[in-house]
Amino acid sequence: MSPSNSAEPHIVEDVAPRPVSSVDAASSAERSREPGTSPAIHALGLSKRFGDTVAVNSLSMTVERGEVFGFLGPNGAGKTTVVKLLLGLARPSGGEALVLGAPLGDREARRRIGYLPELFRFQALLTAREVLRLHCRLLAVPKAAWAEQERSALETVGLLERGDDRVGTFSKGMQQRLGLGVALLGDPSLIVLDEPTSALDPVGRHDVREIIRGLRERGCTVFLNTHLLEEAEHVCDRVAVIDRGRTIATGGLDELLGRHSRVRLRVGGLGEGWWSRFGRFGQWQRQDDWLVVEGIDAARIAELVGELVALGGQVQAVIPEHQSLEARFLELLGER
Amino acid sequence: MSPTLTIAALTIREAVRRRLLLAFLAITVLIAGLSAWGFDRLSHTHSLTSGETNLAIPQALILFMFMFSFVLALSASAIASPSISSEVESGVLMTIVTRPLRRTEVVLGKWLGLATLLAGYAAGVCALEFGVVDWTSGFVPPNPVLVSVYLFLEAALLLTLALLLSTRIPVIAAGVIGVAVFGAGWLAGVVGTIGSALNVAALRTVGQVGRFLLPTDGLWHAAIYYLQPPSLIAQHIADGGQRDPFYAQGAPSWAYLLWVACWFSIIMIAAVASFERREL
């Protein structure tokens, strides 16, 4: 698989986004698509060593503006270290990177970055509103906009009812929701989410996916660091797979999973061996009552079915099968 | 509001909401109440002459203020030690330092918030205790404001040191080191006093070096000086000079105060540089 920097069309189903901010979504989306705008993240040969241990090994990748980018890898692959390098929390041992067109750790660029850390903790003695207000202050959000920003963030993450409760009384999942709310403040151009659903129940995970889709709709770039492949499969436009500090694959999900999939068919009324005439669609195999076509272009399935019906075949079942991201992920790691 | 002031306000708000601060205040009021009873008994006892009472009350006040200076020092170490290290360990600082502010502003904001609390406590405890003494015995220290300032400076030095330790060392270790250093500084001062009394040059040097390496004892003695009425100073001079660790012969020199300012600046710059360079 050759690494690609092109933004692939996303394959997830369209879901109406929830409002994520009071900010004019259209203007944000427009801004992100300005011609000549630098990528949200561009890393070239980024490395990080801790003594003799190489945590990040000459990592290169580009995250385009406005896309949801999944950063995948097994435990200990160096994902969180990369996030820390990108946010200026740690210094690279080598290589370079630009985030929103600025050098790593640039103060002005940080004004346009929202971050939900893997280890999310907030001031236990403050209320959720006070935590959000603190971050509004640090972001230099105009005071007149604080109330709306707080309300919007709390509503988006489902904590509007608990806004005046102290964070110390929150469950882990609620604190993670609050962390997401904090990351949404100030209309960021880039949001870095490090394992954003690690403490959430299925409902919370679904909500986070909806929020991410909403962010994409308003043109915000989302860098999603996760080991939950299902999560990436649901929301990401493109992904990078990292292992032992190195990118081993980058691309759109279609590209990564392969454009050719397979389809399982059950057809009657055509006798035996008829499929030898349809070799141009892919490789055929008989599996009990089923016929399996390997490597068929998904767009040609309808054409195949049409030809079978025209020949007088009784098409009883057509089941397209895609390789799951998990299977591809394991395959990639196995290739290493 | 600048990021430094925002962090300072946050630090104060969090500290005020902690029960630890309430516990300190409760203990302080309790001790001040007990001291009121003690000073009242002392000023109305018939076994002392009025001259002896006039010397005993300031000496007792110095002992009480020593205890409060210890509480201040302990508080400074206790509240500064976890201020950065525990927030790094828990992850609380992660979302703060990724905002558009310098790490220097985080350190300065923390220091400013904690120093404000200590200044408030120093001023409050001096006002309370001096009020108690004045009410029960009529004695007022020669310069109560400077006493409060030097007590605060003593605690502020420990606060700065504990903050520096907190940028690199885990909470408990930083706290223990802070208190131990304070104790060592005081002990060096006592050794120096003994050296002066016995005219042993080596011991006297220990005291002098100690006051330069860690100026807390020197600042405590500055506070003592402004607690002493002229009659007490005259009594000590008549007794042959400095033999008492709770006696100060003179006000701190400008050179010493300049050194204290340098010491403070060096530690503060080290704290800022240490946190700036730390990888989180």
Image: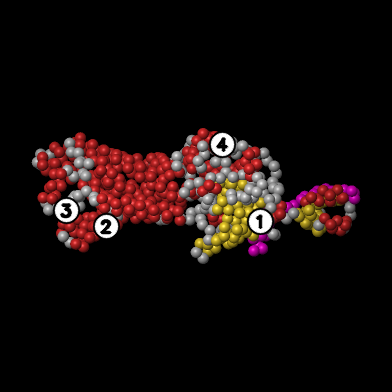
Q: Is residue B121 visible?
A: yes
Residue depicted at 59% across the width and 50% down the height: A101
Residue A290 in percent (x, y) is at 80, 54
Q: Are marks 4 and 3 on the same chain?
A: no
**Badge 2: chain ID:** B
Which quadrant would residue B214 be assigned to in this image?
bottom left
Which residue position holds label 2? B210
Residue depicted at 32% across the width and 42% down the height: B119
In magenta segment, residue A11: no
Residue A69 in percent (x, y) is at 63, 50
Q: CA distance from mark 2 to mark 1?
A: 62 Å
Q: CA distance from mark 3 to mark 2?
A: 17 Å
Q: Are marks 4 and 2 on the same chain?
A: no
Which quadrant would residue B49 be assigned to in this image?
top left
Residue B242: image tag? 3
Residue depicted at 35% across the width and 40% down the height: B22
Q: CA distance from mark 4 to mark 2?
A: 57 Å
Q: CA distance from mark 1 to mark 4?
A: 34 Å
- Provide the secondary structure element on which disc 4 rests: helix
Q: Amino acid at mark 3?
A: Gln
**Labelled pair 1, 4 in contact (Cβ < 8 Å):** no
Dot 1: few (<14), some (14–19), or many (≥20) neighbours within 10 Å? many
Q: Amino acid at mark 4?
A: Ser
Q: Amino acid at mark 2?
A: Gly
Bounds of the magenta span?
A309-336
Residue B88 in percent (x, y) is at 46, 51
Residue A97: image tag? none
Which residue position holds label 4? A152
Q: Nearer the viewer, mark 4 or mark 3?
A: 3
